[in-house]
Image (cartoon, grey):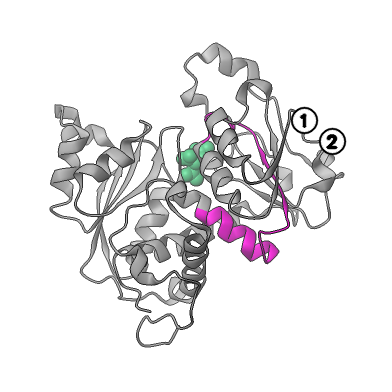
Amino acid sequence: MCGKCYCFLGVFGMVSAADFVGRDIISIKDFTREEIDYILKVAGEMEYLAKGGSDMLRGKIMAALFFEPSTRTRLSFETAMYKLGGAVIGFSEPEISSIRKGENLADTVRVVEKYADVIVLRHPAEGAARFAAEYAEVPVINAGSGAEEHPTQALLDLYTIIKEKGRIDGLTIALMGDLKYGRTVHSLAHALSLYNVKLILVSPESLRMRREVLEDIKKRIEISEHTDVESVLPEIDVLYVTRIQKERFPDIAEYAKVRGSYKIDLNILRKAKENLIILHPLPRVDEISVEVDSTPFAKYFQQVRNGLVVRMALLALILGAIKE
Ligand code: NCD
């Protein structure tokens, strides 16, 4: 990238920046591998703007509509917008908006788009982001739709793997934890199935990967399912751990049965490859012992930083600030 304008030089397959302008980001399944690789390349170019800032999105407004709790996703989208010179409106407590008065999502979206150039939406309902995109003229970015998907998290997970391992192809990657209700692992599994990886799924029996995700990805990559991480740990290059999604259990008694059923600690890690990396979308509850944080395996806090550059890239691309 040259210093003055925001031109990305060099050909990148058949994909170009123009392909992203005005585009919704609803599901990772809407993207090809070439498009994902392009986004990750632009994210790499954002590393230096993340330090110094830029005015490439000056005058642009992002609306962050968060109907569910969030720390990293909302703050990283907001920071990304500010770093690029744009501004942010929105709410993270729907109770203080007109939702409280009974306004529906379709109306909320049609109002907010009169102020904003892009809408970032987190909502407990599966399908909410696609529904919102049908009503909105401006692009909608899915920041988490119930237990269904979290596509921008998957992009930052891929970016972290490339940054730490230099590649995705050829790796053995394990997704561990709540594979039933965890939206991050649904998006990530789909994304990884576009690469040449061996995927290992580790979960309690009752929290196995959603069948429809499994059926889809097993058409493309080799997958095995396990209930115990120890036997497979020696072959894993990337261990992606998730918390049990307590809030999504229809029956709290079911949650009680699996609570605390897995934990990564120093003892287990004695069986790990020396260059294993451990990722986690965070928040962590008790599934990774805090003593792991100071080992070279732990990359989950670097992962947070990577979310910033990936979201800067997405906003710049969607809002047409990147020129070929
Ligand atoms: C995740 C989410 O909201 O799905 N958090 C995040 O966005 N980093 C994971 C989780 O809540 O467990």
Q: Which residues are magenta?
A: 155-182
Residue 169 is one of the magenta-drawn residues: yes
Q: Secondary structure at mark 2?
A: loop
- Labels 2 & 1 near each other (Cβ < 8 A): yes
Q: Residue at x 81, y 42 (%)?
A: 233
Q: From the image, which quarter does the C terminus lie in?
A: bottom left
Q: Residue at x 61, y 41 (%)?
A: 219
Q: Is residue 115 visible?
A: yes
Find disc 2 in the rendering and name its residue.
231
Image coordinates of residue 46 in percent, x first then y, are 46, 72
Q: Is residue 237 left or right of residue 76?
A: right
Residue type highlighted by circle 2? Ser
Measured along the vertical axis of the image, is residue 13 above or below residue 71?
Answer: below
Find disc 1 in the rendering and name its residue.
228
Image coordinates of residue 73 in percent, x first then y, are 43, 49
Image coordinates of residue 109 in percent, x first then y, are 19, 43
Q: Is residue 279 left or right of residue 82?
A: right
Q: Is residue 66 left or right of residue 232?
A: left
Residue type highlighted by circle 1? Asp
